[in-house]
Image (cartoon, grey):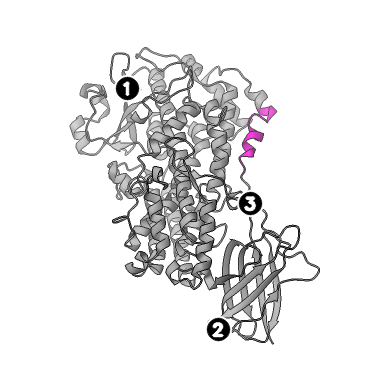
Amino acid sequence: MVTYEIKVKTGDVLGAGTDANVEIVLLGSSGKQTQSATLDNRFRNDFERCRTDVFTIKDKTDIPEVTEIKLRRDKAGSFSDWFVEKIQVTNRTSGYISVFPILRWIPPNVDLYFGRYDASLPQFDPRPEQRRAELQEKRQLYEYEQKRPGFPVQVKNVPNDEEFSFSHKFDLVKLNLTLKADKAKEMIFGDESWETLDDLTDIYSKTFEEPKGMQGWESDVSFGWQRLNGLNPNVICLCTHLPDKFGVTEEMIKPFLEGLTIFQAIRDKRLFITDLEILNGISVIEGYVCPTPIALFFVDARGQLMPVAIQLFQQKGPDNPVFLPTDPPYTWLMAKMWFNVGDSSLHQTVVHLGCTHLILESVCVAANRCLSPSHPMFKLLAPHLLYIIAINDRGLVKLIGPEGVFDILTAVGRKGAAELIAKGTSPWRMDVEGTYPEFLKHRGLYCKDGKILPTFYQRDDRLDLYEAIHSYVSKYATLYYDTNDKIIKDYEIQKFGRELSIPKSEGGCGILGVPLKDGKFSSAEQVALVFTSAIFTSSVVHAAVNFPQYDTYGFPPNYPIKLKGTPPKDKRPLMEEEVVKALVDKSTALDVLTVVSILSERSTNALGDFEVDYIYDPPAVEIVKEFRQNLKNISSKIRDRNKKLVRKYDYLLPEKIPNSTSN
């Protein structure tokens, strides 16, 4: 008799454990198979959630190298449903270990077969009928629905598999429990208005940690830094001309260009512009204003990006002046603060929620509908889809629901937020916004030698990380698609590409710029670009626009979400009292601090350190190891750079980047 050791790990999914009777058959490549054996340890409650159970079976058939298993369960017990993460089989005679990643619910009274490593293209799967039946069921679970006009498509109903596990620490219910629940903080803050700007700085020694954005927040250096290394670096562009609607003249900004003319500054690629025209016509909360600003920036001799002109609304006119650094100090400060009201409105709605969370949900639904869990490309993507649907399902209610976060804290409210998301996500293209080097080229900012915007550290880190992810994905894709014929005949990946690009009105995701040729994938590079875009957006882009929130929003004047009153319409000198009067009251500031401190928390594993392992195919495992080493090298590079900087940028250290948007 031959002895086999079988390790079964039950998954970390709600309701994963089972009381059912489980049987297993071991199969080899020569056609040999064992008798069906029941997996049961006497006097032990086997198959509990997130636990590994070890079984020993004996059989007269010797299969030195087990290449396939057959699994079956019944409906016995009060809880018979069962989600299996993986099964490992060891032939104690040969010593050979075979790993079978399952990562599925096991239905009752059905024989299911799983191959070693469970990674095959559909055209090579030895059990095509089992695979098709499984995908058919998933297509019924993952139906598309556009829940709001203009929004990316989402899942119609949240499948049980997408819910948070018991062991996942983050839960948006925490937001309700924490918001204004700490009475000690409420007493310190109170409901009154602030008296002075110094009054704001006193609260951090008593309640919250001091945010990084508080230091030197009023300086032009900090304001320029925000455009590059803050939460919304997606709007600044190389200035090639001054638009007619912008009332800037040569004489106005001559003192700030270090002896250059506007023409020379443009020629030398030292002049940059931001135009938040997208905010034009967006609804706002009654009694509040959201500017639609245009601003001009100049790179000084020290490489710092400095603001030189701000116009708070789109069309120039006598009541819409161009504010300059030489204006009265508090007048110029107010212009910068009102600019940030517009910028923060765009950040929260489009840059963060729309172009990471919601667009990735479309990709997540398409992947689950079109790609078998056995598909190698699904295994590559799966760690980066973790809890995306769950966080969106809960988050949208808290953010855009009646009396939600947007209504309480922002100038645009839930109505304006919905309008902005629709307006900002509709033109999003996978081959531009979703492909970081192309996005930079589109805005004139692509540079790897530091000659353009030398203090744009976020760009530099994003580029390194994009290249590492693209290399990882390309090598992985080429491992399975070593010929174009394999791509052409892979009907699952072809369906995935079509559903991503089919218009929403025709039942697809409606994502623009999916790199297909004649409606099909025809090369491994096309496939790699799509998966690189999804992984990069889910991890790096989301980390960049999410985790600095506390440091940025945490000091109310630094990056206000809304201000009271109206933006200045002339350049008369303002007093500090008028700046303070424009700030939200202490109670609202407490709400802001609470929300952004929760949103800035990290609660899942770092990039490359996956919560669940999907990849076991040895050549693919080596590619993953190489990716992890590349991430370590990037981390060392960032740390070495930061040693030389007074103001460090460390939000994109790979060890600080989660795998998905689930935070």
**Residue at (37, 17) in percent of width and height:** 328
Q: Which residue is mark 1?
A: 324
**Residue at (66, 66) in percent of width and height:** 109
Residue 359 position (above or below residue 580): below
User: How busy is the neighbourhood of tag 3: few (under 14 within 10 Å), some, or many (20 plus)?
Assistant: some
Q: Can you give x and y, in whole percent of width and height, for residue 621 in the image?
A: 49, 68
Residue type (three-letter) at the residue carrying disc 1:
Leu
Q: Which residue is mark 2?
A: 31
**Residue at (53, 26) in percent of width and height:** 407
* Pointer 1 or 3: first along the chain: 3
Out of 15 and 355, give the one closest to the viewer: 15
Residue type (three-letter) at the residue carrying disc 3:
Ser
Residue 165's disc is 3
Residue 551 position (above or below residue 465): above
Residue type (three-letter) at the residue carrying disc 2:
Gly
* Pointer 3 or 2: first along the chain: 2
Residue 382 visible? The answer is yes
* Pointer 1 or 2: first along the chain: 2
Residue stretch rendered in magenta on the structure: 171-185
At mark 3, the secondary structure is loop
User: How busy is the neighbourhood of tag 1: few (under 14 within 10 Å), some, or many (20 plus)?
Assistant: many
Residue 154 position (above or below residue 197): below
At mark 1, the secondary structure is loop
Residue 98 relative to residue 17: left or right = left
Residue 477 picture quarter? bottom left
Q: Is 67 one of the magenta-colored residues? A: no
Q: Can you give x and y, in whole percent of width and height, for residue 124 in the image?
A: 44, 72
Out of 196 and 488, give the one closest to the viewer: 488
Out of 531 and 257, give the one closest to the viewer: 531
Residues under labels 1 and 3: Cα distance? Answer: 53 Å
